[in-house]
Image (cartoon, rainbow, N blue to C red):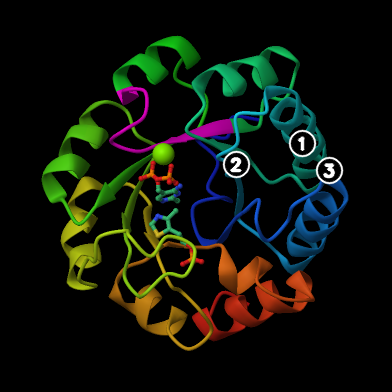
Amino acid sequence: MSWQRSMSWQRGIYAITDSSLLPDDERLIAACEAALQGGLALLQYRDKSTDDARRWRQSQALAALCRRFDVPLIINDDLALTRRLRVAGFDGVGLHLGEQDTSLDEARRLLGSEPIIGASCYASLAIAERAAAAGASYLAFGRFFASQTKPEASPAPLELLAEAARFGLPRVAIGGLDVDNVARVRHAGGDLLATVYAVFGGDDPTGRVAGLRQHAGYA
Ligand SMILES: Cc1ncc(COP(=O)(O)OP(=O)(O)O)c(N)n1
Ligand SMILES: Cc1ncsc1CCOP(=O)(O)O
Ligand SMILES: [Mg+2]
């Protein structure tokens, strides 16, 4: 399966894990399985710890889970971990990079043309243009609303999403998304609606994902 060419991940709900909401393996895996049952387009493993053994163990478990659901797993920040998972045979694994992370050029060079590599563009069409030229698979903008997961993230206006249509890549919207605003974000041009808290911030990730899909008009 060529994920880069597949359309199935390019629209829908993009759930992102958070180690303070899902502090141990058991809770992480159970919540992600429940979220996948609700119908995710993409799942991102975002773990800011420096515990390599834990990151390797958890990301392998999530990669196996995502493979069962035929959903790509995106690794946040960590090119080496992405390569290690792909070498281990998890060919649905991709990478998300921000401005402080490895460069997109370098990641594309080392991973090749096949894997999904997403880029944070914040509120900047100039960053988006550079990322598109360097081979990004999707462009992520935001935060659009107040985010309790990353309160320090800089704000972006929703109009940016329509302007970013010119790059011809899936547009991800992130930051404070919930059932009350996803319809507006999708209408503004968001293809993938990325969220931590609206999926993992309470019980029943399956119902929370289904609710987001329904409110956004994906269900
Ligand atoms: C889908 C998506 N969009 C944006 C981000 C933020 O990436 P970055 O700016 O590198 O910040 P951290 O997530 O690393 O704190 C993301 N992770 N995913
Ligand atoms: C990683 C990241 N980058 C910008 S906002 C954000 C966190 C999104 O989390 P939430 O959906 O809980 O606001
Ligand atoms: Mg990052």
Is 27 a magenta residue?
Answer: no
- Residue at the location (58% across, 73% down)? 198
Classify mark 2 as within 8 Å of ligand 1 or not, answering yes or no.
Answer: no
Q: Which residue is mark 2?
A: 47
- Camera-side residue of 53 and 205: 53
Q: Quadrant of residue 171?
A: bottom left
Residue 211 drawn above or below residue 128? below
* Residue 96 forms part of the magenta stretch: yes
Q: Which residue is mark 1?
A: 58
The numbered mark, 1 or 3, whose residue comes first in the sequence reads 1
Category of crowding for the residue at label 2, using alpha-carbon neighbours closer than 10 angstroms: few (below 14), some (14–19), many (at least 20): many
Q: Which mark is residue 68?
A: 3
Secondary element at tag 2: loop
Check if mark 1's residue and mark 3's residue have beta carbons within 8 Å: no
- Pointer 3 local density, CA inside 10 Å: few below 14, some 14–19, many at least 20: few
Q: Which amino acid type is marked by label 3?
A: Arg
The circle on residue 102 is: none
Q: Quadrant of residue 45?
A: top right
Residue stretch rendered in magenta on the structure? 94-104
Residue 217, how many percent across, how many down?
Answer: 53, 81
Q: Residue 164 in the image: state x and y as whole percent.
A: 21, 56
Alpha carbon separation for disc pair 2 and 3: 22 Å
CB atoms at circles 1 and 2 under 8 Å apart?
A: yes
* Near-viewer residue (174 or 11): 174
- Quadrant occupied by the C terminus: bottom right
Dot 2 or dot 3: first in sequence order is 2
Quadrant location of the N terminus in the rendered image: top right
Mark 1: amino acid: Gln
**Numbered disc 1: secondary structure:** helix
